[in-house]
Structures are given as C-alpha cells and as structure tokens.
Image (tube, grey):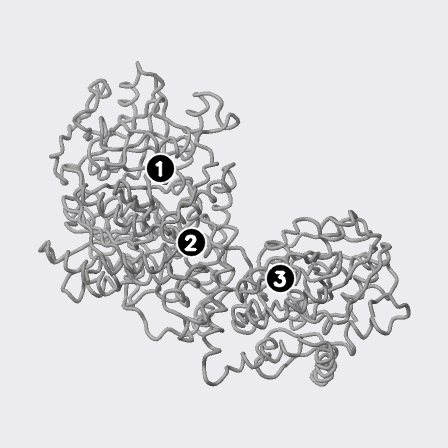
C-alpha cells in the first residue's frame, strides 16, 4: 500500500541512511517538540483508526480472514526458498527478468545499472517503499540520473527543501496548510503563475505536474505489495494512481520488492486484497490496484525487471520467534493505533520504517548491540493495541518482549554490568526471600517518608527521577499492607 | 469460599488501602481471606524489561507460594495477566518445563473477574456517592479481556454516578519501565489521559490496576488536578462508613 | 557465489529444520455474500450501486435497449466532443452519439491525441459489489491500460451479470496473466479526511453505467 495513503504513505524519500542513529528516547524528544507534526499525526491516527474499524467491522468474517492471512504468510515464509524459485520461473516465463540483491548497496547498484542500460538520463519513481532503505535516490543521482519521485507527499517534502526529508513524509494537508502548500507548489517550474490557495486548485497543480512527469517517463521504478509465485503476477495497491501510470506509460519498468512480498498462489489474493486495504486506509478496496505478469505485448512496458531484495530479511527469518514479523503486509495499522507512534512519528525508529512493527524488524535485522537498536524494543508500553489490529496476527508485544530478552542477554555478556542489570538483579534477589523483601519494604518506606511532603513525593533521585519530572508518587505508608494484615484484630491469615 | 489474596508488591508497599479493601469486600461477601506471607512479586517488571532469568526465579517462587490454593485473587490486572499469559512464555524462554506445568495449575483471578464470574455477583452492597470515571487499563482490556465486568460492578454501586471517559481505551503511557526509559513520550501520553479525565468532571478516576493509577494520579497530583484516583476495590468496599473508603 | 545462490542459501539456513513445513490455510471466510447482505441479484446490483457511489463515482442505470441512448446522454451531460474507445467496443454502444467524435484505439493512438480527448468509454471484465470496484483486464471492449488512464473522464459500462458479490468471486473469475486494473473510484491525493483532495493519476471523473440485460 503506498501513495500517500496514511499518516505517512510509506514511500520514502530517499536520502542516505543517517548514521549513527540516536536512541529512541532522544530522537523522540525532537519529534515531541514539533507541535505541527504531533497535530498531524494525531489527526491522521484518529481518522485512520475510525476508518479501519469501520472497514474491518462491516465484514462478518474479519477474524476468519485474519486467520487465513496469518496461515498464508506462514506457509510462504516456511517455504520461502521454494516460492522464490517458483516466482523467478513464472516471471521469467512471462517475459520479465529477475535480479537478486543481497543487500541495499547491491539493490541500488542493480537498479542504477538497469536504468543506465536504457540510455535514459531520467527516471520516475512511484510507490517504492524500499527506496529509502536502499538509498536509491542518491545512488541514481550519483550515476548522473535525474530522479523524479511522483508520490505527492514526497514531492511536497522535496519542495520544502532539505536534502533529506522525514522518513515517511506525511501527505500534505490540503485543507489545513493551504497557504504553505501554495507557496511550495508555486515553486514548481510548470505551476500556473496565479496559483490560488484553494485545496482543489493546489491538488490539481500538483497532479498536473506529476502527470507531465509520468506521461513522459521512459523508465520507471516502482514497488510491489505482493508477488504471486505460481503466476509471476506483481500486485500494487495505492491511492494516488502514480503506480498505475508507472506500469502503463514507460518502456522499461523496474520493480523493487523485498523477498518477503511473495505469496504462493493467485487465489491467496482473495484474502490479502481484503485485509490490506481495509487495514491500511480503511478503504474497502484501494482506489487503484494494478497487477502485471511479465510483459504484455502492446500494453504497458516492453521490458520488466524485478529486483528481489534481501537486505536483512533472511536475518529476521533466522529468528524462530521473530520470523513472524515477516508476515507483515505493510499496512501500517499497528502504527496508526500505537499511542507511542502517534506522538513521535516515523523518524525515531530509523530508516526501515516506524511504528511497532518497525521496532521489531529493525533490531531483528541490525542486531541489538548498538544502543540505538537496543532501544527500539523498549519504545512501547506493550499496550497491545497493535496485536488487536494486525491483519496477519503478528504478536507484536510478544516479539517486543522477546527482543528485550535478547537485549538483556547481550548485556549480560559484557565485562562490566550495566546499572540496570545490577538493579534488576538486586531487586530479584530482594524479592526472592520473605525476610529480605520485608526489610526492603521497611527501609523503602523510611526513605520515602524523608523525601515526601504532604504525603507526596515530588522528586526522586537517580533513574527514578525520570518519574518525578512530571509525576508525583504517593509516600508509602509505614508497614505496608502486610503490616496492617498482621496488626488486625482477627486472625484470618495463613500465618 | 477460602480465597488467597495476592496483593502484589506494588500495592503492598505503596497502596495498602487496596489490599485492605479487597479483604474487607470479600469478607463482607462471606468469604474467608488468607494472606500467604511468603508472597513477594510476580516478576512482571523483570519479564517485560527482558530479565527472563530473574522473572523465572520469581515465577517459580510465586508458583510455590500459591500453587496449593484453589482460588487466588489479586487487585492487579497486570499481575494476573503476567501469571496467566506470561508464565508459560517465561518457562519456555528459560527452558523450564516444570515451571510451565506449575503455571498451568495456578488459579489466579483478577478481582472483577472473581466477583462476576466465580462468585456471580455484581451488586456487592457498596455505597459511594460520587462521580466516577473508569479507565480500562491495557492489561484489563486487551490481555484479560475484562470487558464490561468492572462497569457492571460500578453501575450496581449505590449513589455512584458513572461518567464516560473519552478515548478510554488508549494507554496512559505507564508501561512499567517505559515510564522511565521513554519518560518524555510517557509524559506526553499521560498528559492527554489527564486532559480527558479532567474533561469528565469526575470526582474519582478508578481502574483495576494501581500501576496505571499511580501514573495518572501522579500527573493529576502534580497538576493539582482535583480528581482523586482510587482502585476499583476501594470503591466496591465502600459502604459509607468512614474507615472503608479512600486512600490513607 | 551469485547473490541468487547466496540469498537462497541464507533462506535455507535461516529456516533450518522448519523448512518445508506445510501450513494449512483455514478458509472459513466467506466466498459469497450472505443472504442477509444480498438475497437476490437485484440486491447485489443495489450494493454495487451504493458502494460505487460511495467512492465519488457517478452511477447510471440502463436497460439493454437504451444502452446507446444512456451512453450518449452521459457524454452529452459532460459536453464531451471527442472521446476514445477501444477498437473492439461493441458498435451499438456508440450508435446514438450525435456530435461526439469517437477515436477507435487499436493500440496506436499517440499520447498527445489521447491527452486532447474529453473522455473514454470502456466495458469491464468484472465488477465487485462489496467493494464498489470495476476491474479492467485489457480484454474485449476495454482496450490497453493507457486508454483508461489518460483521459480525465471514464465512462465504464458494466453489465449486471458481470457484477460479483465479493473479492474471492472476482479473483476466481479473473485471469492473472492479463494486465488488470482494479478501479475503486477516482484516485485520491493527500492523507485521510482533512488532508484528502482530488488528485492523483487516472480519470478524476468516473461514471459507471450499469446495464440490466
């Protein structure tokens, strides 16, 4: 699903991967301070939640569809090698060429080479979720190829300046930000000189500009939501229709998709084409769905290249529990219901994409050695809203806890224990025996009374100080519950 | 019925009124409450933060202390959820088949489940003449699936006016160590929760988990929010007699 | 080792013993509309009508004998002067046109000509009631993709017997080797609700003419 479909349509604007990545909490601070971003995220999340709920709720068999979706994706993943080989065969037989990219650099190199081989100096991109992941735009630019992204959010982000716009630029708010949009769109070389600031005219100006780009394109790069192994059919769902143009107009089409986008059979689409649009945008069906199988003489591109991208996906597959994350069909429903994402947006999660599933996938791919990657599994309250909406039933909170375990285990191997490890061990030791526990209750209460004023603690030392930056804590009463229990007149206890 | 109370360490230390309320309430309904004194912590914090080994130690301890009881009741939805949903995972994570079996035999109920499902009561004879809003905590809502059980109990309380909390199902931002590790996001979340709570003009916000209530209540207290937080048990225990209601 | 071999080997190593495990797909979902949703053919057509209209498309109804008049009326209402049509569009559909020039596309019409046209008339392969979708497969009366992409107005003739209830029914009817375009209303640009505006690529005006045979 792409094409400005969500609080950040998933395309990408494609700058180089920023290194080193900051820890989630630090990156989140920047996002939290951006009130405009928070307002947009909140409004979009609310709208998308409502729409998703209505679209899923009107089907009497939503749970059965989710169960089927889960099984289809699991079947795919447990037989991924066989389905990839079958896909390669079907695509080739239908007249397409299949290329394999082990990592981001190879994918960028392959696409660049394929573009150069056409002799064209320009390329349009439409609905390529992997563009940012593989640094596509920079690679093409370095090779002297002019790139024209056609997703509206990306166009606007580019006009707004900054070589590297947000991870997933939010779609423009035509009704709200019309003054700013007018200023940006007026910068288009082919903008009408007296561009008014009403939403329809602004959308039309953007559309006309992109239309000229798309209709004159000789080479296009697009993505695919699904690739059907048994028929070689590639499937793209979108709102804006740029992909529809990209699979229609150019002579050469280069499609870049992760190896996890494969599905076994054509009939599996009867499930996935229901789950994905309703989960992603709350549409009963996305406004435009295009499917293409190899090349069709006289209709659409004469040359089709499919670039199959690994770039860490097999590392996810290698984690027996984490493997389930590859069921993901990239609907972003988990992000739209996530209260953390709603306040931070994509950026703090890093270039592989945000939201709860991003917090799972990135550490699975990158490992948990770096502080930034290790911080991602903790970027969640484990509230569980994501698991309830996931159309392929990924237990995201369970995977986050699984990864937290991996983070802790990796820290245990360090020569000097982390302060947190020391604290957690000592807490467990204290809780491991009644006498130690009761002694700790007594001394804790004593300390707390020293820190409290009027029954409230307004400032705590150390790590706990993070709590009292904005929240009081009640002063613990002497004796705690067990003190009262022992002191009460009748003896009802087991003691 | 003889009921073993698991009060939860957090309540034992910080919110003794909640354990008192559960005791008073269950005894008022004619049941015998016992308090196994060896109980400490269910291991929730260790498990959700990634400390699987320590969580497993505490889970084994919990199973030892509560293994023989026919009915264990706790006023902590998140601890009940830990025992019921996480213990098997903890056991598998550390490869302890015995713990997995022991966890399977534990009969731990969250208070409102115990009242409605096991005892079959919704009117517990409480009197609480205040405007009350209910916050369904994430563990109540999405792990235990308590549904409307707490609301049915509250609606049966005499004098109580139940008001609806907007965006009630959204997390308050507590999340255990999340509140410390991602303090800024956590505070942004609780700020929205507090705004909704104050918008209800309720006197009291109640929930089935003191962790979340400490978080929301801590923010309300900092802002001098004028809304008290109370555990569901404390409202259900209230009869108008001064000793039974409210926090110390 | 080629990247192909490397990736396939990584996959096999990653899966280890789990590789090749078959997963049964529980197909308990509905393949057809329930009787409550649509008891008769008329109900299916009514649902399609409602759901196409919900996607900001215009819906007209016609009988087999006034199809040509209805096509002419729709074009007249848009003041369309020059339109495109696939070369194999049934002749009768356009037989009532008066003052409208139809360019029959055999796959050679150039882009510039197409851009200068006021609209396009096509048929479809399948239509889906539950989602309000029409699907074009490049087959009879539909033409190539470019034809239904470029003009800003698309009049799509849907015979009632082409309307199926659900997505599974449509998937079963469609042939994957054909170039399929599933259209559910005009394209949209921007985010949800307050951000949304008409825009994107493809005809901004979509009109569906349902023919009850």
Residues at circles 1 and 3 in contact by the CB criterion of under 8 Å: no
Q: Please, is residue C110 above or below residue A189 in the view?
A: above
Q: From the image, tell me which residue sits under label 3.
A: B82
Q: From the image, tell me which residue sits under label 2.
A: A332
**Position in image of residue B188 (x %, y %):** 54, 67
Furthest-right residue in this view: A489
Q: Please, is residue A323 above or below residue C155 in the view?
A: below
Query: In this orientation, which residue lies closer to the viewer: C78 or B8?
Result: B8
Q: Are discs 2 and 1 both within one chain?
A: yes
Rounded to the nearest whole Å, what is the CA distance between mark 1 and mark 3?
40 Å
Which chain is indicated by disc 2? A
- Image quadrant where residue B204 sits: bottom right
Please rate how many residues cluster around mark 3, counting C-alpha atoms within 10 Å: few if below 14, some from 14 to 19, many from 20.
Answer: many
Left or right: residue C117 versus residue A83 is left
Please rate how many residues cluster around mark 1, counting C-alpha atoms within 10 Å: few if below 14, some from 14 to 19, many from 20.
Answer: some
Q: Please, is residue A302 above or below residue C211 in the view?
A: below
- Image quadrant where residue B82 sits: bottom right
What residue do we see at 71% from left, 58% from top?
B202
Left or right: residue A421 versus residue A72 is right
Query: In this orientation, which residue lies closer to the viewer: A107 or C192?
Result: A107
Q: Nearer the viewer, mark 3 or mark 2?
A: 3
Left or right: residue A93 versus residue A455 is left
Query: In this orientation, which residue lies closer to the viewer: A208 or C55?
Result: C55
Label of residue A267 in the image: 1
Which chain is indicated by disc 1? A
Rounded to the nearest whole Å, what is the CA distance between mark 2 and mark 1?
24 Å
């Amino acid at each position: 699903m792409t094409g400005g479909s969500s609080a950040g349509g998933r395309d990408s604007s494609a700058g180089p991967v920023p290194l080193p990545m900051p820890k989630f909490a630090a990156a989140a601070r920047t996002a939290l301070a951006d009130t405009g971003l928070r307002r947009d995220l909140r409004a979009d999340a609310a709208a998308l939640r409502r729409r998703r709920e209505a679209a899923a709720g009107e089907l009497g068999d939503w749970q059965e569809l989710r169960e089927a979706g889960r099984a289809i994706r699991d079947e795919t993943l447990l037989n991924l090698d066989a389905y990839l080989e079958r896909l390669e065969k079907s695509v080739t037989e239908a007249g397409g060429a299949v290329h394999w990219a082990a990592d981001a650099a190879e994918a960028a190199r392959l696409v660049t080479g394929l573009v150069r081989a056409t002799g064209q100096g320009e390329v349009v991109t439409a609905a390529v979720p992997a563009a940012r992941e593989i640094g596509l735009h920079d690679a093409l630019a370095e090779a002297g190829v002019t790139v024209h992204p056609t997703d509206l959010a990306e166009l606007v982000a580019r006009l707004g300046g900054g070589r590297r716009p947000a991870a997933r630029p939010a779609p423009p708010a035509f009704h709200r930000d019309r003054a700013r949009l007018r200023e940006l769109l007026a910068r288009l070389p082919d903008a009408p000189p007296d561009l008014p600031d009403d939403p329809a005219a602004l959308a039309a100006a953007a559309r006309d500009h992109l239309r000229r780009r798309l209709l004159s394109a000789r080479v296009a790069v697009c993505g695919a939501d699904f690739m059907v192994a048994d028929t070689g059919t590639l499937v793209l769902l979108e709102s804006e229709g740029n992909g529809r143009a990209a699979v229609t107009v150019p002579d050469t089409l280069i499609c870049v998709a992760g190896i996890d986008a494969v599905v076994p059979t054509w009939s599996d689409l009867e499930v996935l084409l229901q789950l994905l649009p309703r989960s992603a945008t709350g549409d009963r069906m996305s406004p435009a769905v295009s499917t293409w199988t190899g090349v069709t003489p006289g209709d659409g591109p004469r040359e089709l290249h499919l670039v199959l991208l690994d770039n860490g996906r097999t590392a996810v597959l290698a984690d027996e529990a984490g493997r389930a994350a590859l069921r993901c069909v990239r609907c972003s429903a988990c992000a739209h219901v996530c209260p953390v994402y709603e306040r931070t947006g994509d950026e703090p999660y890093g270039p592989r994409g945000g939201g709860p599933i991003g917090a799972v996938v990135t550490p699975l791919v990158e490992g948990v050695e770096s502080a930034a990657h290790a911080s991602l599994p903790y970027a969640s309250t484990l509230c569980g809203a994501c698991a309830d909406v996931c159309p392929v039933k990924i237990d995201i909170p369970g995977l986050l806890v699984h990864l937290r375990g991996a983070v802790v285990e990796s820290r245990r191997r360090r020569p000097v224990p982390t302060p947190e490890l020391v604290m957690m061990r000592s807490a467990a030791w204290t809780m491991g025996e009644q006498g130690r526990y009761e002694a700790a209750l007594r001394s804790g209460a004593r300390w707390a009374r020293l820190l409290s004023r009027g029954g409230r603690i307004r400032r705590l030392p150390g790590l706990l100080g993070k709590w009292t930056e904005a929240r009081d804590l009640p002063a613990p009463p002497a004796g705690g519950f067990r003190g009262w229990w022992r002191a009460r007149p009748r003896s009802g206890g087991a003691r | 019925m003889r009921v073993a109370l698991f009060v939860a360490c957090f309540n034992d230390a910080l919110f003794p009124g909640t354990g008192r309320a559960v005791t008073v309430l269950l005894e008022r309904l004619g049941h015998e409450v016992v308090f196994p004194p060896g109980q400490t912590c269910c291991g929730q914090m260790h498990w959700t933060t990634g400390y699987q080994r320590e969580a497993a130690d505490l889970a084994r301890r919990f199973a030892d202390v509560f293994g023989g009881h026919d009915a264990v009741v706790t006023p902590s939805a998140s601890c009940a959820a830990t025992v019921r949903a996480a213990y098997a995972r903890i056991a598998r994570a550390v490869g302890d088949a015995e713990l997995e079996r022991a966890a399977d035999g534990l009969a731990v109920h969250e208070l409102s489940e115990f009242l409605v499902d096991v005892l079959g009561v919704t009117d517990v004879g409480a009197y609480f003449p205040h405007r009350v809003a209910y916050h369904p905590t994430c563990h109540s809502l999405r792990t235990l699936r308590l549904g409307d059980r707490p609301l049915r109990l509250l609606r049966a309380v005499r004098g109580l006016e139940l008001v609806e909390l907007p965006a009630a199902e959204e997390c308050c931002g507590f999340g255990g160590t999340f509140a410390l590790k991602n303090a800024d996001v956590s505070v942004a979340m609780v700020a929205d929760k507090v705004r909704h709570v104050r918008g209800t003009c309720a006197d009291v916000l109640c929930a089935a988990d003191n962790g979340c209530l400490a978080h929301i209540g801590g923010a309300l207290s900092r802002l001098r929010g004028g809304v008290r937080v109370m555990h569901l048990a404390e409202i259900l225990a209230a009869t108008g007699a001064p000793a039974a209601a409210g926090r110390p | 080792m080629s990247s192909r071999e490397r990736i396939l080997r990584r996959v096999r190593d990653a899966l280890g013993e789990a590789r090749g495990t078959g997963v049964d797909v529980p197909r308990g979902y509905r393949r057809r509309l329930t009787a409550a949703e649509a008891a008769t053919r008329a109900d299916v057509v009514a649902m399609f009508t409602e759901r196409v209209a919900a996607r900001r498309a215009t819906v007209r109804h016609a009988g087999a004998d006034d199809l040509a008049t209805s096509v002419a009326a729709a074009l007249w209402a848009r003041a369309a002067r020059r339109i495109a049509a696939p070369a194999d569009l049934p002749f009768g559909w356009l037989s009532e046109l008066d003052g409208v020039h139809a360019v029959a596309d055999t796959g050679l019409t150039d882009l510039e000509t197409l851009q200068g046209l006021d609209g396009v008339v096509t048929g479809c392969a399948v239509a889906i009631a539950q989602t309000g979708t029409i699907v074009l497969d490049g087959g009879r009366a539909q033409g190539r993709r470019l034809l239904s992409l470029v003009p800003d107005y698309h009049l799509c003739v849907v015979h009632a017997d082409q309307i199926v209830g659900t997505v599974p029914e449509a998937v079963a009817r469609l042939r994957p080797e054909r170039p399929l375009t599933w259209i559910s209303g005009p394209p949209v640009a921007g985010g949800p609700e307050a951000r949304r505006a008409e825009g994107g690529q493809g005809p901004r005006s979509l009109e569906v003419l349902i023919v009850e045979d």
